[in-house]
Image (cartoon, coloured by chain):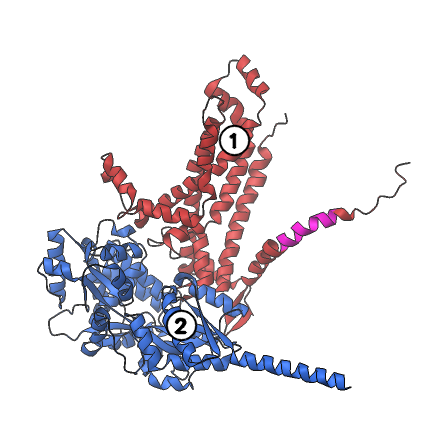
Amino acid sequence: MMRLSTKGAFLATTLLAATAASAQEATLIIESWRNDDLAIWQNEIIPAFEAAHPGISVKFTPSAPAEYNAVLNSKLDAGSAGDIVTCRPFDASLALFEAGHLADLSDLDGMSSFSDVAKSGWSTDDGSATYCVPMASVIHGFIYNKDAFEELGLSVPTTEAEFFAALDTIKEDGSYIPMAMGTNDQWEAATMGYNNIGPNYWKGEEGRNALIAGEQKLTDEAWVAPYRQLAKWGPYLGDGFEAQTYPDSQNIFTLGRAAIYPAGSWEVSGFNNLVDFEMGAFYPPVQNAGDTCYISDHTDIGIGMNAATEHPEAAMTFLNWVASSEFSTIFANALPGFFPLSNAEVTLEDPLAQEFISWRGECESSIRSTYQILSRGTPNLENDTWNASAAVIKGTETPEEAGQRLQDGLASWYAPQQ
Amino acid sequence: MAHTTKQKPRYHIAVFLAPAVIVYTAVMIYPLFNTLRLALFTEIDQQRVWVGLQNFRTLFGDAIWSDQFWNALGNNAWFFLIHMLVQNPIGVALAAILSSPRLRFSAFYRTAIFIPTILSFVIVGFAWKLILSPIWGIAPDMLDAIGLKFLYAPWLGKEEYALTTLSLVSVWQYVGIPMMLIYAALLSIPDEILEAGECDGITGMSAFFKIKLPLILPSIGIISILTFVANFNAFDLIYAAQGALAGPDFSTDILGTFMYRTFFGFQLQLGDPHMGSAIASAMFGVILIGVCIYLFGIQRRLRSYQF
């Protein structure tokens, strides 16, 4: 009898110890597509978090960007996904939330430090529930080779006329490819082309919301004009740009062979390590001097919680920390070019990244036109925009035809446009 | 007397067949039928709903889907045609040359030609993309060196050339397979037959066309059907070289990439496993029809010779 109870007591203590240990030592696994950031997470972000929260350990396990959505969906369906999920903006994550894979985070304390615009990428259409903590945005513009500009006596273009004059000068001189971009991968033409220069024409949020509401059409001048500008880009891109891939373009620019690079701010940290010339950035030139400038300040990365996680409390602790200014500061400085969306004060040390973020004060911010709601149906507007932008630059489709084709595709399933 | 002993049940047959049957059922037959089943459902409000043949009606009746499907099927047919016109004749020719007893270093050539077949398609896709690249590639420089630079175009980026270029890359990679099969068939032709032909004055090229070719026709038939199945299931090289959107302007889109995009989704396009399964079923149908035509229309008419 005595023997038995001792044994029972031992058993009980072991069990207690075991549960206590498991509560203490939660391991959170983060799913992400940012495999470029592996080193930053492992060396800076995770140690900072773990130092402040003993007992929770964090593992960052990214997969390849192109496969991320497919891999994540399969893992979530199979129940083998990590505790923390890096969220793509808009519909991909909304679908996960609606399928019950992402937890509702509307009540998370840290959510109060984000504006509604920042949260829009990860909220339901009516804004009632938010399911990911906004982590970073990217800003579009043009990065240029300062040395090349100095050599050719060029100044930073602010209007479209100046922009094309600068391109002509570079082309005539011949020592640099005027602009490094290819159409092989298609998305560059849409993301760094159409959605980069477009907001100036459709007046940012104003036009974007009007398109969603069905008050404007893709055949309107504001939406066709960016294609008209893209159609003029072709001659300024390098020889054989039709088969030039995204890494090709990056290499051409960082090797100093091209003068201008239509960019997203995510390039900043990568380029900083590669170039041996000085870089500057300018926002998309406006049509006429004095016009308000609009930039694409696109909500890009959020972070949420797998609803099926075994460690919801530890995950909440982590997400609250992600919403803090401590995380924002580490993240923004470790990854210059990804700009925190929180209202917390952040100072950037990188001059190029600082240049990008400074446009928030000068210009009106908007997000990419195709991302919210409009890419839900078949045909997919975002994919069609890639295709149309590439075709327009190559000259195989006119701007008007492209606008008409996209409008027909959108109208075929989107009621407000019918 | 022997007839009276009752035959024991032969359990060992079942035991020996079991591993293969179980593995094949688990990884091939079950997924295949499950895919066919999945094609008959759709998802409405997170619920899987039976819709019968609705997905197929959409696929073939809705211009948004059917245009893509026929475009992909047409590209697949072109992909197959290039293989049949280029890969298999070259394979036969290489095998004929290799089987010539006068050829020196034939083992070396055989290995060298076969090696690309065992390379990963990722390596092949990437290497050829680099070779043909207008920026870093050696193709423009090599053409320049012999004064033919004007022939160079950024092939992978032009709608009119991209698919043919990729087909030829695939031919380069897989030409070793028909070569090996034909080579084996050629070696199995007994010398007596050739010698008998020689007595009748049939030598050289005419010996090949009049004696060897008829004898290896069954092998060529097998190779054709293997090429057909492999080509209509193709996906990897296109995906590695051009991505899931199979650019430029879907000119390299084949059924495999179309199915992948639909099933798993792409960028902002969400995956639709049910439409994806419908496409996969259509692929299965296309391949099944092709194989049946071959089996019933061609295979039976081929005469095989026993030596």
Chain letter of disc 1 in the image: B
Q: Residue B251 carries which label?
A: none
The answer to which of A216 and B126 lies nearer the viewer is: B126
Pointer 1 and pointer 2 on the same chain: no
Side of B94 where B131 appears, left or right: left
Which residue: 34% across, 67% down?
A: A410
Which residue: 57% across, 20% down?
A: B191
- Quadrant, the C terminus of chain B: top right
Range of the magenta residues?
B13-25
Residue B59: x and y, percent?
46, 59
Residue farthest along the left direction in this orientation: A153
Residue B202: x and y, percent?
51, 16
The answer to which of B120 and B280 lies nearer the viewer is: B120
Quarter residue B174 falls in = top left
Amino acid of disc 2: Asp
Residue A34 visible in the snapshot: no
Residue B132 visible in the snapshot: yes
- Quadrant, the N terminus of chain B: top right
What's the magenta bit mostly, secondary-structure-wise?
helix
Label 1: few (<14), some (14–19) or many (≥20) C-alpha neighbours in 10 Å:
many
Residue picked out by circle 2:
A91
Residue B272: x and y, percent?
47, 65
In the rendered image of this protein, which colour is used for chain B?
A: red
Residue B184 position (above or below residue B171): above
Side of A274 where B217 appears, left or right: right
Residue picked out by circle 1:
B183
Q: What element carries label 2?
A: helix
The answer to which of B31 and B296 lies nearer the viewer is: B31
